[in-house]
Image (cartoon, helix red, strand yellow):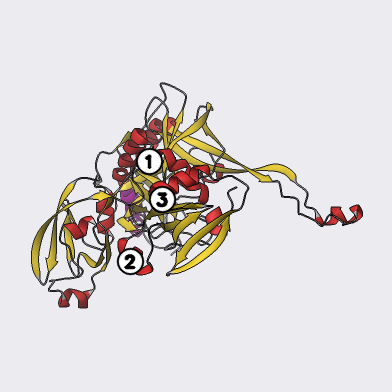
Amino acid sequence: MNFSQFNASAGLVKIKRFRSGGVLGALLVAAALIMPALSVAAGLPDFTDLIEKNSPAVVKINTINKVSNNLRRQELPPNMPDIFRDFFQERSSPERKSQAIGSGFIISQDGYILTNNHVVDGADEIQVRLNDRQEFAAEVVGVDRRSDLALLKVDAEDLPSVEFARSDDLRVGEWVVAIGSPFGLDYSASAGIVSAIGRSIPTERGEDYVPFIQTDVAINPGNSGGPLFNLKGEVVGINSQIYTRSGGSIGLSFAIPVSVALEVVDQLKDKGRVERGWLGVYIQDVDKDLAKSLGLSKPQGALIAQVEENSPADKAGMKPGDVVIKLNGRSIVDASDLPHTVGLIKPGTTAAGTLIRNGQRREVSVKVDVRPGDEDRASAQADQDRLGLEVVEIEERIKDNWRLPGGVMVRTVLPETPAERAGLQPGDVLVQLGYQVINNLSDYDQVLAKLPSNTPVALRFFRRGRSIFRTIELD
C-alpha cells in the first residue's frame, strides 16, 4: 500500500486514499501516526512568557584582561661590542588584550549581579550589557572560588531582577530553562529536564562543596554564569560547567543549586568573602563489603578514615571507622553528601549527627568550625594571592616530627603564579621569606604585605622534613 499524504490541523485529519485498500485502513494508519504526536505536543510546556519576563534581567558579560609583553633586558658583559647587543637583548612589545564572554543575571534592582568566578577571574575590566543595549562597568564585590561564584555591582537603579526559588525541591525529570549568551549569541534560550541532583564534581584542588544539578539543557561556552529557571520563572541554579568532548553541548550540563548561591551572596555582601563549615575528617564511600563488616544493613553514609587532631570532629568524639549517616537534619547517603552538608552550615553552629559505630547507632553533637585559612584576615586577603598560595597553620604533629619552631603549611598552589614558578607544592611548610622568619599566619601576612615586586626574594621551606631554599619573585 502506498500512502500519499495526510495533514493534521486544528484536530482535523484529511486523508487521501491509498492506491489499494479502503478508507478504514487509511484512518487506522493515520490515527496511529498522529495521536502519539498530538499527545506529546499537548504535554509540552510553553516557555514564551517565562523567557519574555526574565530575559531583561539576564546580562551578557564581556571581560578584558590586559597582558603585558614587556620583557626584561638581559644582562650582558660590559665589554661586548654594540653590534652584537641587539641580537641578545630582548625587546618589549606593546600591551595586548585578551577578551572573554560569559553570562550573568541581576539579583536586585540596585545593581547586584551574580555570575561564575571563572567568568571574571583575572579580568582588568568587566562590562555588563543588558538586552535593551544598556552597558555598565561592573566592580567585583567578592568571589568564592570553591563554589565558582562571583558577585558584581553596577552603578544603576530600578533594574529588572530575577526571583530565586527558596528551596531545593527540584525533582529529576522537571523542566528547566537556561538563558544566556552561548558563543556570544545574546540572550539565547534553551530548555531541558533535570537529569540528576546532588552530583559530586570535585574541583582541581580536590574540594567538593557543591551538590550540582545535572541537566540535559543545551549549555555552551558563553552560558557560564547564566540562570537556570524552573517553570515558575524562579532561578533554581547557576549554569557553571559542561561535560564535553567537542567543546559544545552533548547533553551534560551542571548548575550550582540556589541554596549554595544564596548563602554565598549573603556572605559576599556582608564581608566580601565566604566562610564554610569544617569538621576535620577524611572520608570515603561505603561499599557492600565494608557495609557488612561495619554492621550496616546496606551501603550508606560517609566512612571516616581519619580525624584531624583538635578538629571539631575530634572534639565531638568522632573516630576512624565511624559511619556518618545523618547531619544537621540531612541524610548522608554517599560520602560526597557530607561535605555538601557541612559546607552549608554556618561556622559556630552546633549540629546534631547520627553515626554507626561497631554496628550501633550513636547520636553526636558537633560544633562546626570555620575551615582553616578562611578566618578573618581581610586586611591581608589581597596580599595572600600575590604569591598564589593558600596557607594554614602548621599542625603540631608536623612541628614535632620535623622539629620546627613554627611555620605555615601550603594547602593550595594556584597555577601560573609566582608560587608555582618557584616550585612550591601542597604540604610544604614555609619558614622564611626574605630575611624574615615565618612562625604563624600573622607573620606570613605581615611579611607578604611588604614584599617588593619584580625582585627575587629568598624563600626557605621544608618538604617531607628536608630544608630547601628557593627564590620567589612577585610580578
Q: How many numbered circles are shown?
A: 3
User: For mark 2, what is the residue?
Assistant: 400
**Camera-side mark, 1 or 2:** 2
**Residue 386 rendering spot, x and y as whole percentages:** 52, 47
Q: In the image, which residues are magenta?
A: 23-41
- Residue type at mark 3 is Val
**Camera-side mark, 1 or 3:** 1
**Residue 268 rendering spot, x and y as whole percentages:** 36, 37
Query: Mark 1 vs mark 3: which is more N-terminal?
Result: 3
Query: Mark 2 vs mark 3: which is more N-terminal?
Result: 3
Q: Quadrant of residue 166?
A: top left
Query: Mark 1 vs mark 2: which is more N-terminal?
Result: 1
- Residue type at mark 2 is Asp
Q: Residue at the top extreme?
A: 158
- Label annotation for residue 217: 3
User: For mark 1, what is the residue?
Assistant: 273
- Please tell me whether mark 3 sits on a helix, a strand or a loop: loop
